[in-house]
Image: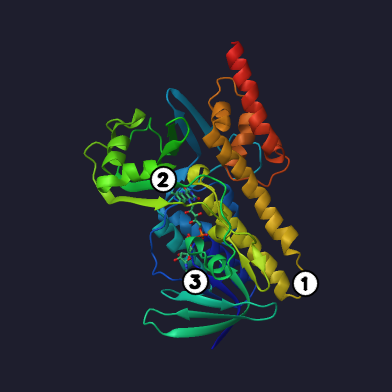
Amino acid sequence: MENVDVLIIGAGPSGAVASAYLNKQNIKVLVLEKQKFPRFVIGESLLPHCMDHLSEVGFIDNIKKHGFQEKTGAAFYKGKHKTEFFFNDQFSDGWSWTWQVKRADFDNILISTAIEQGVEVKFECEVNSVAASASEQTTTYTDKSGKTHTVKSKYIIDASGYGRVLPRLFKLEEPVSTPPRGAVFCHIHDTKRTKKAGANIFIHSFNENSAWIWAIPFSDKTTSVGVVSNVELVDEFAANNGEKFLNHIRTFGDLVGRFENEKLVFEPRTIHNYAVRSKQLFGPGYVLCGNSTEFLDPVFSSGVTLATGSGLLAAKLTEKVLNGEQVNWSEVYEEKLRRGIDVFRTFVLGWYNGDLQTIIYSNDIDPNIKKQICSVLAGYVWDTENPVVKKHKTLIPTLAEVIRIKEKEA
Ligand SMILES: Cc1cc2nc3c(=O)[nH]c(=O)nc-3n(C[C@H](O)[C@H](O)[C@H](O)COP(=O)(O)OP(=O)(O)OC[C@H]3O[C@@H](n4cnc5c(N)ncnc54)[C@H](O)[C@@H]3O)c2cc1C
């Protein structure tokens, strides 16, 4: 029987940040991770706001040493339209750059840095059951030899990402309201990349806003490419080892010629129904963070930033609980997190229904609105000084309608 203050399930970005924060407060943490690191996970384009979280737990210097591709903005394309956002031209005060990362390397650096700082992590240990209560939590896990162990802890942070351990065990899964979508993707050599093509992520929408391509260049002259759409189109693209997908990215728009005769780093892979949601984000003795809470859509690269932000906040509030303070989890955690996620939700809905695309591709987009949108794209979704954050639900459809009327009149 092991005894720790806080047990964290999962060593992805959310678990790594949460564990490092608690360890810095001299709280005894154990991270249990199912896989051996480095391990693959999709989600390679970061947002500037996650730099605030990584910096607070002392991760930035070690990440810098790796030489990941710096990301200063994002380019969006649709037919003949192109628009670029640069994070040094945004409304909120904050980071103006971040990275594009191969997550196997990036996540390994994060958790290795936490270990360097003193966090205990057990890899290849899968959590199977949890009995949670207000005072004591009992978790069982299986190690790689198949042996079962038990850990007692005062609190549990579920950072198990797509594993969604507590949402599954405690029946917290909630259906999502968005249509089932998926992605087909691979990494490909990109030796012909030109300066003009740029090194920032680009997103190219097609099929009347229902589908889009990502290209995320890495610093080692390989690039992550993917298509996101409804699951039927994803299956069509993925058939025959991704034949249609590869043909599409080799012949589409500005990509013509770029990936011709280039070797794949790995064969196309698919993910279906990536959107998930939990009906509550905390309970007696536990809190969910990262993808255990909710994942909407990859289009605005929000996943890792929400994972590091929620991991950090969950850790700070857990520290208070361990210090005997009363924490109103509903107000200071769940409502706060959902407010930020809701801003991204408006953007995601507006992306697929065309409202947001109408705004960003408009020739006469107000420069102030563009800065405000840029701050959301940088992840600063809790900056209520930003009118686009404050009034996102009404502002996005209204702006789109005004632009449509103006364009009709012109
Ligand atoms: C197609 C697609 C593209 C995406 N693109 C982006 C992007 O460009 N940018 C971005 O920010 N996000 C992106 N995302 C989202 C991103 O992948 C996730 O939001 C992010 O990885 C969540 O981090 P996390 O720490 O919550 O979980 P994870 O990174 O999934 O880590 C969770 C860890 O928990 C471990 N675990 C699971 N079950 C157990 C268990 N039973 N016991 C112990 N350990 C367990 C897992 O092995 C894993 O290592 C994308 C998602 C999709 C589907």
Q: Is residue 368 above or below residue 49?
A: above
* Residue 356 seen: yes
Q: Which residue is denoted by mark 3 in the rendering? A: 115
* Number of other residues with Cα within 10 Å of mark 2, as a class: few under 14, some 14 to 19, many 20 or more: some
Q: Quadrant of residue 232?
A: top left
Of circles 2 and 3, which is in front?
2
Q: Residue furthest top?
A: 410
Residue 231, label in figure = 2
Query: Which residue does the numbered mark 1 point to in the structure image?
Result: 325
* Residue 327 left/right relative to 97: right
Label 3 within 8 A of ligand 1 by Cβ: no
Which amino acid does the dot numbered 2 rest on? Val
Q: Residue at x 31, y 35 (%)?
A: 248
Task: Tell me how the rendering is colored.
Answer: rainbow
**Residue 137 % position (x, y):** 62, 79
Which of the labelled discs sits on residue 42, or is there none? none
Which sits earlier in the primary sequence, circle 3 or circle 1?
3
The amino acid type found where label 3 is placed reads Ile
Instruction: Using a 10 Å C-alpha cutoff, classify the residue at mark 3 as few (fewer than 14 neighbours), some (14 to 19) or many (20 or more).
Output: some
Q: Is residue 367 visible?
A: no
Q: Element under label 3?
A: helix
Real-space Cα separation, disc 1 to disc 2, in angstroms: 46 Å
Q: Tell which circle, 1 or 2, labels the residue nearer the N-terminal end.
A: 2
Q: On screen, 288 above or below 389?
A: below
Residue 374: give x, y in percent of width and height.
Answer: 59, 36
| Residue drawn at (56%, 26%) of the image | 358
Q: Label 1 is placed on what type of residue?
A: Glu
Please state which of residues 258 and 340 is positioned toward the viewer in this rendering: 340
Q: Quadrant location of the C terminus?
A: top right
| Residue drawn at 73 percent across, 75 percent down | 323
Relative to 410, is 6 above or below?
A: below
